[in-house]
Image (cartoon, rainbow, N blue to C red):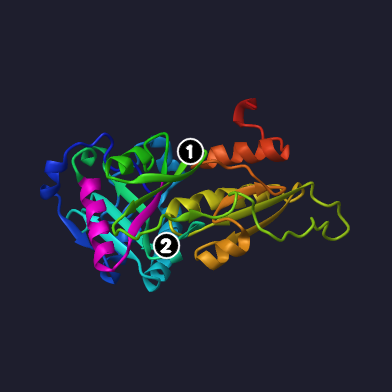
Amino acid sequence: MGNAADGEDGGMGLMAEVEVRRAGRGEMAELAGFCLPAYPGGKAGFANPAAAGEYPPAVQREMYRERLAWLGGAMARGLVAFLAGPPQAAFGLAEGVPVEAAPRRVRGRGLLFLTCLWVEPADRRGRGVGRALLTAVEDEARRLGKGGVATLGYAQGGHKPAGFFRRCGYSEVDRRGDLVLLFKALAPDARPPEWLGAGGRGPKTRAAPDPGRGGAAPRHRLELIWSGQCPYFWAAAQAVREWAAAHRDLVQFSEHRSDDPAAADRLGTAGGVFVDGRQVDRGPRSRREIFDLLDECCGATPPAQPGGAP
């Protein structure tokens, strides 16, 4: 989870004006609802008008529930979290866990893994909020005796941009497509993290398609792996479930949770949508985009639209 932190921020002098506060168990509801407009302190609205229809309050309640459950488990594993701005009116969030508990297949020793850095609304970006939050995370990592901070960023687009972290002193460790593994040493003996596996391989053990009661076996195997770390992971997972339910004759569907490193290692990946063992999703997608993607990958014929449109 995370969006543009500070864009082309150069406003280091603005950091003193940003109120950053530690978030613990007493702030779990605020952390869980920060990016959901239906909750107090959440985003005032979706920038994309289509998103309001895609994430109505009933859907956001499920997103909130899964996010809250993940936060509870993460706190037991050493979650570090900060909010920028006053209670119930925060405009920035940062959180991380010990790298040994990272919800990605990133491994290391004695590091903090930044899972999320989010600044919202857009007019708060470029004003030092992201830098202030990142500084708070790094200071906390030092206090905890961590040797450095690691995170994943994107080479393109405004979603948790890798360029922001480079300007904050982070170096690139590895890259897979648009996704970049970044690291900043806070101690002389800190070692960079490692990105395990080739990425996107799907579960290591798979059952053959089951034909069921006398029927023909489905032509494809559809597998979903997801984590509750970001509420939008749940929304994407729900879209995959809905598509699979409508195409039971075409696919054999299974899903798995990867909320902890042991589960991710057992599955061989921390997340993705797989058709016949091949990962088909690359980056965040809307509900409609997921439907279109699965139609294409599995050879499904999309239902006719009202008025005879294809």
Locate residue 309: give its quadrant.
Answer: top right
Residue that carries the numbered disc 1 in the rendered image: 178
**Does the magenta portion include 151?**
yes
Outermost residue, bottom side: 76
What range is drawn magenta here?
A: 129-152
SS assignment at label 2: helix
Q: Residue at x 71, y 61 (%)?
A: 205
Q: Looking at numbered disc 2 in the image, what kind of residue is underneath it?
A: Val
Q: Residue at x 29, y 59 (%)?
A: 187
In space, the residues marked 1 and 2 are separated at their CA atoms by 21 Å
Q: Would residue 237 be found to the left or right of residue 163 on screen?
A: right
Tag of residue 255: none
Q: Looking at numbered disc 1 in the image, what kind of residue is underneath it?
A: Asp
Quarter holding the C terminus is: top right
Whole-percent x, y for residue 262 in the image: 55, 67
Neighbour tally class for label 2: few under 14, some 14-19, many 20 plus, Cα within 10 Å = many
Residue that carries the numbered disc 2 in the rendered image: 99
SS assignment at label 1: loop
Q: Residue at x 61, y 64 (%)?
A: 266
Instruction: Give above or below for 8 relative to 202.
Output: above
Locate residue 100: give its quadrant.
Answer: bottom left
Identify the main secondary structure in magenta: helix
Instruction: Give above or below for 235 relative to 107.
Output: above
Neighbour tally class for label 1: few under 14, some 14-19, many 20 plus, Cα within 10 Å = few
Which of 98/125 is in front?
Answer: 98
